[in-house]
Amino acid sequence: MTDYEAIIGLETHIQLNTESKIFCSCKADSWEDAPNTNICPVCCGLPGVLPKLNQAVVEKGVLLAKAMNSEIRNVSYFDRKNYFYPDLPKGYQITQFDQSIGKGGYMDVPIPGTVTADHQPYVRRVGIWKLHMEEDAGKTKTEVGKRMVDFNRCGVPLIEMVTAPEIRSAEEAGQYLIRLRQLLRWIGISEANMERGQLRCDANVSIRVKGETKLNPKTEIKNVNSIEAVKDAIEKEIERQTREMEAGNRIESWTLEWDEDTNTLKKMRSKETEADYRYFREPDLLSVNLTEEWKSRILNGFPELPLARRERFITQYGLPEYDAEILTSERRLSDYYENAVKAYGSDPKKVSNWLMNEVLRMINEQGLDPETMALTPTALAEILKLVDAGTVNITTGRTLLGKVQQTGKSPTEIVAMEGLAKVSDDSAIRKVCEEVLAENPNEVATYKAGKVTLIGWFTGAVMKKMRGQADAALAKKILEELLK
Ligand code: ZN
Ligand code: MN
């Protein structure tokens, strides 16, 4: 058997989360709106109208270029990409062709479960060829006897980003998309929800005999709208090309469409080349001039990015990689963590444990936003301090999390109001211990016959009777004494 390798490049379209469209003031996000409700003469391409560039689109483009380590062009401009399709009323798309806002760059993508020769986690650096602003087209829909068109999406701002063919497997393609989605949300330029088409991916796939350097003809897979489907489609296409090559057939440059009902690839058309689009400079728009002053205003406060923050959490706070990965999955969560560590003042790993186990469960179950939830990082730190000081025990500490979130009151206030302070009074605990032993003669006999592990069960029973507020260590000590 010949050994083949896959050569994969991804083209992504990212829907920016601006209020309005790229060249008019229509609302950009139409996900919940009826067809053709967010349209105007500009985005419908009526004769005589003029586009006007939305400043927010440029700013978000600059943020993405920075995050992708791209060169940010001080002067970029728009072109017309001409083609006819019913969802494109102007007959051309306004896009950037040879002078795009971002040039070059790369994104680092850690590949889980793989290591380098010297046992370091393996990171695939994926080169970025270009990154440009453009407008979206509308949507067509077919029903029996009808062909319908919805122009709501016309003029919705997009960034198209093209990678170098440096991805080597379906798994790597999936990881690239996971990291890209994380990054887009992190820098706040897109919701990047694939199911809603806010992040769309086309994959260019070819294969070659391992060790060769020339590129074979590639196919382009379109219309895949989940990360799992992208991986699935690439996997199937690599298998198909391998079969063809083994049979001595030539691979042709097709465009393939992913059919999500049958999980198969279908041939759409032979691929157009760039010359087919007759690109020329858009005469209705001036070039985009990024002054140094504007650029520094956009980049002012640019955040530390997720992978860098993950590394810092490992070195600065001594967190295991697992904790650091989860805590940096979302920017707001990592801010929450750092604020809680600051407020607590010691033991960052303990803060991580509470956050990842108890608080994160609350966030997920109740759909909370770490930035605005009532249980603030300061309140979490306060609860930890109450536990440390012995004011409440751990069980009460855990219930306090939910109570603070529910009432918005401070932990100390709730402890005082509800009388939750830990009972460390020897005689009070002793009384309950005696009750528990008197009520369970069988267990006492079993214990005395040698099954000393029952001590945990007795302690649990005491804690239950005392609504979790007893000093558990003290209860255990008294029980052992009484059982002697
Ligand atoms: Zn419009
Ligand atoms: Mn495009």
Image (cartoon, rainbow, N blue to C red):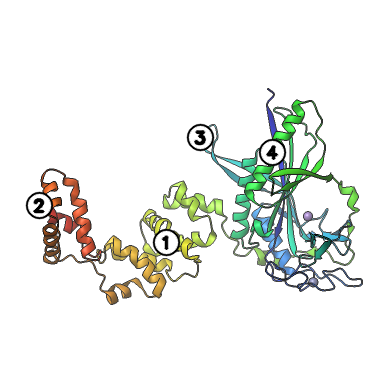
- Evaluate whether residue 53 shows in this view: yes
* Cα gap from disc 1 to disc 3, whole angstroms: 33 Å
* Cα gap from disc 4 to disc 2, whole angstroms: 68 Å
Amino acid identity at mark 1: Val
Instruction: State which tag comes first along the sequence, 4 or 2.
Output: 4
Q: Residue furthest front?
A: 144
Q: Residue furthest bottom?
A: 417
- 2 or 3: mark nearer the eye: 2
Instruction: State which tag comes first along the sequence, 1 or 3.
Output: 3
Q: Secondary structure at mark 2?
A: helix
Instruction: State which tag comes first along the sequence, 3 or 4.
Output: 3
Viewer-proximal residue, 199 or 274? 199
Amino acid identity at mark 3: His
Q: Position of residue 358 (x, y in %)?
A: 40, 59
Task: From the image, tell me which residue sits under label 4.
Answer: 236
Vertical order, 326 against 156 (above or below): above
Ligand 1 picture quarter = bottom right
Q: Is residue 448 left or right of residue 278?
A: left
Amino acid identity at mark 4: Lys
- 2 or 1: mark nearer the eye: 2
Mark 4 and mark 2 residues within 8 Å of each other at the beta carbon: no
Task: From the image, tell me which residue sits under label 3.
Answer: 119
Task: From the image, tell me which residue sits under label 1.
Answer: 359
Q: Residues within 10 Å of mark 2 (few under 14, many from 20)?
A: some
Task: From the image, tell me which residue sits under label 2.
Answer: 483
